[in-house]
Structures are given as C-alpha cells and as structure tokens.
C-alpha cells in the first residue's frame, strides 16, 4: 500500500504571490470603502443627494414669491410655421452639473460648480432652485418684473450656491460656444443678480413692476450684463448624468428683434394634486385644448 505524501494543504506554485495579491485587494477595498469610492456607495450618494426628489412650492395665488422653491424649464416649440422655421423638441431644465469627485467624496458641493440643461423634468435636488431676495424683501412677498433676485440651490448637500455670470473674456467663457459663462458660486455679488422680463417686447414697459405669474413663459435676464439666460441645444456636454446641453447667458434675437426659443423659460411650481409633481405636468383645461385644435385646423 502506497503512502500518501501529497494533500490539498501543500502549497504549490506562486502561493506567496497569491497571498500578497489577496492582501492588496483587501487593502484597496477597505481604502475605497473608507473614502466612499465603491460603486454601490457612489450610486447611493447620487440617489440620496443629487437625484433626491424635491418638493416645489405651491403658489395659491398663481404668483412667484421670494422663498419659493421652483424649477426653471426651457420648453419645446415643435410646431413648425413661418415664424418658427426651426422647431425645438423636448424640454430642458436648468440643473447643477458637479464634478464626479465632488459627488462621491465631499459632504456638500463647493464653488465653483457648473450648470447644464437636463432633459429630466422631474423636480430633484439638482434642478430645484430657491428665489432669494437681495433688496430686503421678506419671504412670501411677490416677485415683480424687473426686480433683482438670486437663484440659489438648496442647503445640505447642494451647498447653498448662487447662480452667477459675468462678461466673457479670453480666460473665462463657456466651454463649447465660448459665450458668456453661467455657473454657481458661494459669494453674493451683483454678478449673482437676475431679473424676470415680460416675454412680449411691446408690452414689456406696461408690465414693469407688476407681480410675476408662475408657470408662464418669461425671460430671465442677467442684471449686470443684460444678457438672457439661454439653453444651447446644439452644444452637447457629456456629464455624469448623460448627454446634456450647454447653459449660457446670451440674447438670441430674430429678424423682428424678439427673443427666440433659446431664451424662453417657464418657472415651474408645485402642484397641489397628489398624482402630479408640477404644474407643468398638469393637463390643460378642455377649453384651452379646443382653442389649440381650432388654431391648428
């Protein structure tokens, strides 16, 4: 009977290298877990902080107020006509565009931070902004046409940052179009001030100083440079959230000296209904739908 001299406990081959490799893998895993760099942790941070559902303010009187949490939406204009030879498809919202490292590692966003136009029209942490006063107006007071205000992000992880812009220069401009850059900062100044302007230029002076209604098309103008906030759909940015469009401050005028679709914005508020998130998602009354059908026919 032969004597068994070999068993599974005998170490063969490069066993020492295999042990060292396993130890290095475990050490690397523990370091990544401590820094929050594991894929499951990154996904959790995105859902918990950036993509967390936001509650927009409900305007009972149909007006915008200081302190309201709103969403800025650039609407589509897909009906082709003589006045609209280039239809605009899909809706985009002004959204925070942070760096990947800031989302996964930091406890809150820090300045400077970019912005972009996202096709996600559901209110969440990255596309909800708070209307803030700069002239001493109390929260709850109506916002008026031509009145300076600040758009800031929510507190906690979003960092309480303010939407800002300044004249373009050789060293500072938007990445794709090289126009006036729009970003987020933590410093309040005249560069963070914006105004809402009535859409129709022929009635603009008549509406100056009147309260701004919510969920209607308006222009958002930078107070210092007098340039309108714009979505440039032909300039695509590759972000952590997919393909998005560039945001800039630039006024686009047609042949009649009227601002074009790139500058049109709807300041969206919340819907009191339980099954609809925003007033933008609310179905139109039957009377308005019939009017649109008559115009098309």
Image (tube, helix red, strand yellow):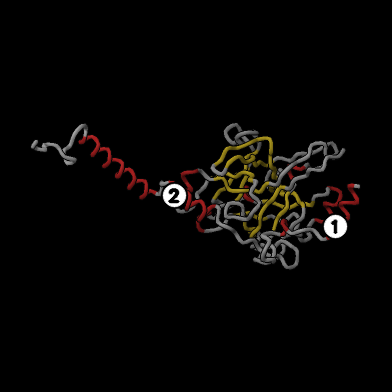
Name the outermost residue toward the front.
Answer: 1
Residue bearing the label numbered 2: 40
Q: Is residue 212 visible?
A: no
Q: Is residue 72 visible?
A: yes
Q: Residue at x 77, y 55 (%)?
A: 216
Residue bearing the label numbered 1: 288
Q: Residue at x 85, y 57 (%)?
A: 288
Q: CA distance from mark 2 to mark 1?
A: 47 Å
**x%, y% of residue 255?**
84, 36
Q: Residue at x 74, y 63 (%)?
A: 63
Which element is circle 1 on? helix
The numbered mark at residue 9 is none
Q: Say left or right for 290 vs 275.
A: right
Residue 275, compared with residue 74, is above or below; it is below
**x%, y% of residue 297?**
91, 47
Residue 30, compared with residue 283, is above or below; it is above
Quarter the N terminus occupies: top left
Which element is circle 2 on? helix
Q: Nearer the viewer, residue 72 or 6?
A: 6
Crowd band around label 1 with a 10 angstrom C-alpha radius: few (<14), some (14–19), many (20+): few
Q: Residue at x 83, y 49 (%)?
A: 200
């Amino acid at each position: 009977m032969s004597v068994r001299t070999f068993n599974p406990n005998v170490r063969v081959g490069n066993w020492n290298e295999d042990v060292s490799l396993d130890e290095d893998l475990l050490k690397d895993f523990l370091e990544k877990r401590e820094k929050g760099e594991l894929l499951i942790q990154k996904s959790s941070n995105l859902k918990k902080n950036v993509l967390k559902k936001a509650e927009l303010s409900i305007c009972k009187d149909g007006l915008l107020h200081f302190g309201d949490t709103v969403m800025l939406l650039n609407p589509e204009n897909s009906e082709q006509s003589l006045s609209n030879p280039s239809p605009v498809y899909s809706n985009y919202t002004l959204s925070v565009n942070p760096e990947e490292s800031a989302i996964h590692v930091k406890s809150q966003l820090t300045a400077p931070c970019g912005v972009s136009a996202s096709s996600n029209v559901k209110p969440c942490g990255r596309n909800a902004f708070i209307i803030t006063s700069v002239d001493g107006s109390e929260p709850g007071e109506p916002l008026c046409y031509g009145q300076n205000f600040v758009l800031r992000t929510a507190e906690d992880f979003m960092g309480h940052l303010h939407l800002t812009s300044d004249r373009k220069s050789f060293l500072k401009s938007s990445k794709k179009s090289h126009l006036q850059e729009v970003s987020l900062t933590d410093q309040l100044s005249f560069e963070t001030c914006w105004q809402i302007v009535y859409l129709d230029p022929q009635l603009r002076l008549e509406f100056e100083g009147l309260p701004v209604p919510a969920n209607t098309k308006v222009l958002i103008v930078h107070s210092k440079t007098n340039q309108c906030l714009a979505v440039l759909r032909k300039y695509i940015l590759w972000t952590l959230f997919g393909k998005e469009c560039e945001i800039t401050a630039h006024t686009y005028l047609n042949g009649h000296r009227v601002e074009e679709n790139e500058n049109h914005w709807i300041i969206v508020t919340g819907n009191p209904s339980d099954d609809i998130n925003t007033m933008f998602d609310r179905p139109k009354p039957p009377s308005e739908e019939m009017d649109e059908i008559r115009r098309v026919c």
